[in-house]
Amino acid sequence: MARGSTGGPPGPAARRPPASKADYVHETLRQEIHDGTLPPGSAIGQEEIAARLGVSITPVREALRRLESDGLISYRAHRGATVAELAADAAEELYLLRAVVEGLTARLAAARITADQLDRLRAVHARMRAAHERGDAAALARDSREFHQSVADAGGPAFLAAHVRSIRQNNPVPPSVSLWNDPANARRFLDAHERLLRALADRDAAAAERIMAEHIQASAAVRGENSAGPAAAPAAD
Protein backbone atom coordinates (compact mmCIF):
# COMPACT_ATOMS: atom_id res chain seq x y z
CA MET A 1 0.00 0.00 0.00
CA ALA A 2 1.43 3.40 -0.98
CA ARG A 3 2.06 5.91 1.73
CA GLY A 4 0.51 9.31 1.65
CA SER A 5 2.39 12.58 1.86
CA THR A 6 4.36 13.06 5.03
CA GLY A 7 3.78 16.81 4.92
CA GLY A 8 0.08 16.77 5.69
CA PRO A 9 -1.68 16.50 9.05
CA PRO A 10 -1.96 13.11 10.73
CA GLY A 11 -4.95 10.98 9.84
CA PRO A 12 -7.71 9.84 12.23
CA ALA A 13 -5.71 6.82 13.38
CA ALA A 14 -2.76 9.02 14.40
CA ARG A 15 -4.77 11.84 15.99
CA ARG A 16 -7.73 10.91 18.15
CA PRO A 17 -9.47 13.86 19.77
CA PRO A 18 -10.85 13.39 23.30
CA ALA A 19 -14.32 11.88 23.40
CA SER A 20 -15.68 14.71 25.58
CA LYS A 21 -14.72 18.06 27.09
CA ALA A 22 -14.07 16.35 30.42
CA ASP A 23 -11.70 13.94 28.64
CA TYR A 24 -9.96 16.91 27.03
CA VAL A 25 -9.48 18.68 30.36
CA HIS A 26 -8.39 15.45 32.08
CA GLU A 27 -5.76 14.61 29.46
CA THR A 28 -4.48 18.19 29.28
CA LEU A 29 -4.05 18.49 33.04
CA ARG A 30 -2.56 14.98 33.30
CA GLN A 31 0.05 15.91 30.68
CA GLU A 32 0.82 19.21 32.44
CA ILE A 33 1.35 17.32 35.71
CA HIS A 34 3.59 14.78 33.99
CA ASP A 35 5.77 17.36 32.23
CA GLY A 36 6.08 19.61 35.29
CA THR A 37 4.00 22.52 33.95
CA LEU A 38 1.89 21.94 37.08
CA PRO A 39 4.49 20.99 39.73
CA PRO A 40 3.68 19.15 42.98
CA GLY A 41 1.89 21.39 45.46
CA SER A 42 0.62 23.89 42.90
CA ALA A 43 -2.98 25.02 43.21
CA ILE A 44 -5.47 24.23 40.45
CA GLY A 45 -8.13 26.92 40.10
CA GLN A 46 -11.28 25.67 38.44
CA GLU A 47 -12.17 29.03 36.94
CA GLU A 48 -8.65 29.59 35.58
CA ILE A 49 -8.57 26.12 34.02
CA ALA A 50 -12.02 26.59 32.47
CA ALA A 51 -11.04 29.94 30.95
CA ARG A 52 -7.66 28.70 29.73
CA LEU A 53 -9.09 25.59 28.07
CA GLY A 54 -12.24 27.24 26.79
CA VAL A 55 -14.74 25.04 28.63
CA SER A 56 -17.31 25.48 31.37
CA ILE A 57 -16.77 24.62 35.02
CA THR A 58 -18.69 21.32 34.74
CA PRO A 59 -16.11 19.35 32.68
CA VAL A 60 -13.32 20.83 34.81
CA ARG A 61 -14.95 19.49 37.97
CA GLU A 62 -15.42 16.06 36.38
CA ALA A 63 -11.80 16.01 35.22
CA LEU A 64 -10.57 16.97 38.70
CA ARG A 65 -12.58 14.16 40.26
CA ARG A 66 -10.91 11.71 37.89
CA LEU A 67 -7.46 13.14 38.60
CA GLU A 68 -8.13 12.78 42.31
CA SER A 69 -9.09 9.14 41.73
CA ASP A 70 -5.83 8.74 39.76
CA GLY A 71 -3.95 10.05 42.79
CA LEU A 72 -2.58 13.03 40.83
CA ILE A 73 -4.37 15.76 42.78
CA SER A 74 -5.63 16.17 46.32
CA TYR A 75 -7.89 18.62 48.11
CA ARG A 76 -6.63 20.79 50.98
CA ALA A 77 -8.59 22.94 53.38
CA HIS A 78 -8.71 26.58 52.24
CA ARG A 79 -6.71 25.75 49.09
CA GLY A 80 -8.95 23.52 47.03
CA ALA A 81 -7.38 21.22 44.47
CA THR A 82 -3.57 20.95 44.40
CA VAL A 83 -1.16 18.70 42.52
CA ALA A 84 -0.38 15.80 44.82
CA GLU A 85 2.88 15.68 46.75
CA LEU A 86 4.37 12.45 48.02
CA ALA A 87 5.50 12.48 51.64
CA ALA A 88 8.81 10.84 52.52
CA ASP A 89 7.21 7.75 54.08
CA ALA A 90 4.92 7.29 51.08
CA ALA A 91 7.88 7.68 48.72
CA GLU A 92 9.75 4.99 50.61
CA GLU A 93 6.79 2.61 50.31
CA LEU A 94 6.48 3.39 46.61
CA TYR A 95 10.10 2.50 45.92
CA LEU A 96 9.78 -0.68 47.99
CA LEU A 97 6.72 -1.62 45.92
CA ARG A 98 8.53 -0.89 42.67
CA ALA A 99 11.56 -2.92 43.71
CA VAL A 100 9.40 -5.95 44.48
CA VAL A 101 7.07 -5.73 41.48
CA GLU A 102 9.67 -4.78 38.88
CA GLY A 103 12.12 -7.27 40.35
CA LEU A 104 9.49 -9.95 39.82
CA THR A 105 8.84 -8.83 36.23
CA ALA A 106 12.58 -9.02 35.53
CA ARG A 107 12.72 -12.52 37.01
CA LEU A 108 9.82 -13.63 34.82
CA ALA A 109 11.25 -11.84 31.78
CA ALA A 110 14.44 -13.91 32.03
CA ALA A 111 12.33 -16.95 31.19
CA ARG A 112 9.77 -15.36 28.89
CA ILE A 113 11.51 -12.67 26.86
CA THR A 114 11.67 -13.28 23.12
CA ALA A 115 14.62 -12.53 20.87
CA ASP A 116 12.72 -9.61 19.32
CA GLN A 117 11.90 -8.15 22.73
CA LEU A 118 15.52 -8.47 23.82
CA ASP A 119 16.67 -6.76 20.63
CA ARG A 120 14.25 -3.88 21.27
CA LEU A 121 15.58 -3.52 24.83
CA ARG A 122 19.13 -3.40 23.49
CA ALA A 123 18.08 -0.71 21.00
CA VAL A 124 16.56 1.38 23.79
CA HIS A 125 19.75 0.96 25.83
CA ALA A 126 21.88 2.03 22.84
CA ARG A 127 19.73 5.16 22.46
CA MET A 128 20.25 5.89 26.15
CA ARG A 129 24.02 5.55 25.84
CA ALA A 130 23.95 8.01 22.95
CA ALA A 131 21.71 10.40 24.91
CA HIS A 132 24.13 10.26 27.83
CA GLU A 133 27.03 11.13 25.55
CA ARG A 134 25.24 14.25 24.33
CA GLY A 135 23.90 15.18 27.78
CA ASP A 136 20.21 14.76 26.91
CA ALA A 137 18.61 14.09 30.31
CA ALA A 138 15.06 14.36 28.96
CA ALA A 139 15.72 11.59 26.42
CA LEU A 140 17.36 9.46 29.13
CA ALA A 141 14.34 9.78 31.41
CA ARG A 142 11.91 9.03 28.58
CA ASP A 143 13.83 6.00 27.34
CA SER A 144 14.35 4.72 30.90
CA ARG A 145 10.59 4.59 31.33
CA GLU A 146 10.36 2.65 28.06
CA PHE A 147 13.15 0.29 29.16
CA HIS A 148 11.51 -0.53 32.49
CA GLN A 149 8.07 -0.88 30.95
CA SER A 150 9.42 -3.16 28.21
CA VAL A 151 10.92 -5.47 30.83
CA ALA A 152 7.54 -5.53 32.59
CA ASP A 153 5.71 -6.18 29.32
CA ALA A 154 8.00 -9.13 28.60
CA GLY A 155 7.80 -10.61 32.09
CA GLY A 156 4.25 -9.92 33.20
CA PRO A 157 1.97 -9.21 30.24
CA ALA A 158 -1.15 -10.64 31.89
CA PHE A 159 -1.20 -8.42 34.99
CA LEU A 160 2.12 -7.08 36.28
CA ALA A 161 2.91 -4.88 33.28
CA ALA A 162 -0.32 -2.93 33.73
CA HIS A 163 0.47 -2.52 37.42
CA VAL A 164 3.93 -1.11 36.63
CA ARG A 165 2.42 1.26 34.06
CA SER A 166 -0.19 2.48 36.56
CA ILE A 167 2.46 3.21 39.20
CA ARG A 168 4.40 5.35 36.77
CA GLN A 169 1.41 7.16 35.31
CA ASN A 170 0.05 8.07 38.73
CA ASN A 171 3.40 9.17 40.15
CA PRO A 172 5.11 11.19 37.40
CA VAL A 173 8.52 12.80 37.77
CA PRO A 174 8.74 16.43 36.58
CA PRO A 175 11.81 16.94 34.36
CA SER A 176 13.29 19.45 36.81
CA VAL A 177 13.72 16.78 39.52
CA SER A 178 14.62 13.79 37.34
CA LEU A 179 17.55 11.80 38.70
CA TRP A 180 18.82 11.54 35.12
CA ASN A 181 19.83 15.22 35.29
CA ASP A 182 22.94 14.15 37.23
CA PRO A 183 25.55 12.55 34.91
CA ALA A 184 26.91 10.42 37.77
CA ASN A 185 23.45 8.98 38.40
CA ALA A 186 23.03 8.40 34.68
CA ARG A 187 26.25 6.38 34.49
CA ARG A 188 25.25 4.19 37.45
CA PHE A 189 21.75 3.61 36.11
CA LEU A 190 22.98 2.77 32.61
CA ASP A 191 25.47 0.29 34.05
CA ALA A 192 22.60 -1.37 35.93
CA HIS A 193 20.55 -1.57 32.72
CA GLU A 194 23.51 -3.18 30.95
CA ARG A 195 23.92 -5.79 33.69
CA LEU A 196 20.21 -6.50 33.50
CA LEU A 197 20.41 -7.01 29.75
CA ARG A 198 23.17 -9.58 30.24
CA ALA A 199 21.13 -11.42 32.88
CA LEU A 200 18.11 -11.51 30.59
CA ALA A 201 20.20 -12.77 27.68
CA ASP A 202 21.69 -15.47 29.93
CA ARG A 203 18.20 -16.45 31.18
CA ASP A 204 19.47 -15.87 34.72
CA ALA A 205 16.23 -15.21 36.59
CA ALA A 206 17.78 -14.74 40.04
CA ALA A 207 20.35 -12.25 38.77
CA ALA A 208 17.74 -10.32 36.76
CA GLU A 209 15.50 -9.94 39.81
CA ARG A 210 18.39 -8.90 42.05
CA ILE A 211 19.79 -6.36 39.58
CA MET A 212 16.41 -4.73 38.97
CA ALA A 213 15.55 -4.54 42.67
CA GLU A 214 18.98 -3.14 43.60
CA HIS A 215 18.75 -0.62 40.75
CA ILE A 216 15.44 0.73 42.04
CA GLN A 217 16.68 0.72 45.64
CA ALA A 218 19.72 2.73 44.51
CA SER A 219 17.36 5.25 42.90
CA ALA A 220 15.46 5.47 46.17
CA ALA A 221 18.66 6.13 48.10
CA VAL A 222 19.66 8.97 45.76
CA ARG A 223 16.15 10.42 45.90
CA GLY A 224 16.25 10.32 49.69
CA GLU A 225 19.60 12.12 49.77
CA ASN A 226 18.25 14.82 47.45
CA SER A 227 14.96 15.35 49.27
CA ALA A 228 14.36 17.57 52.25
CA GLY A 229 10.71 17.15 53.10
CA PRO A 230 8.05 15.87 50.67
CA ALA A 231 9.39 13.92 47.74
CA ALA A 232 8.23 15.26 44.41
CA ALA A 233 6.65 12.32 42.63
CA PRO A 234 9.59 9.90 42.67
CA ALA A 235 8.14 7.02 40.69
CA ALA A 236 10.72 6.78 37.93
CA ASP A 237 14.48 6.42 38.27
Image (spheres, helix red, strand yellow):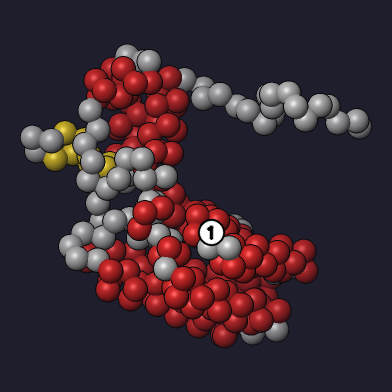
Q: Is residue 96 visible?
A: no
**Residue 52 quadrant:** top left
The residue sitting at 49% across, 59% down in the picture is 137
Left-right relation of 158 to 118: left
Q: Is residue 5 visible?
A: yes
The residue sitting at 46% across, 71% down in the picture is 183
Q: Quadrant of the C terminus?
A: bottom left
Eyeballing the image, is 37 above or below 26?
below
Measuring from the top left, give residue 39's x and y in whole percent. Answer: 30, 45
**Residue 93 quadrant:** bottom left
Left-right relation of 172 to 9: left
Q: Quadrant of the N terminus?
A: top right
Q: Residue furthest right?
A: 1
Measuring from the top left, give residue 235's x and y in whole percent. Answer: 39, 60
Measuring from the top left, give residue 44's x and y in whole percent. Answer: 24, 33
Q: Relative to the observer, which residue lies in front, 114 or 234?
A: 234
Eyeballing the image, is 41 above or below 161?
above
Secondary structure found at label 1? loop
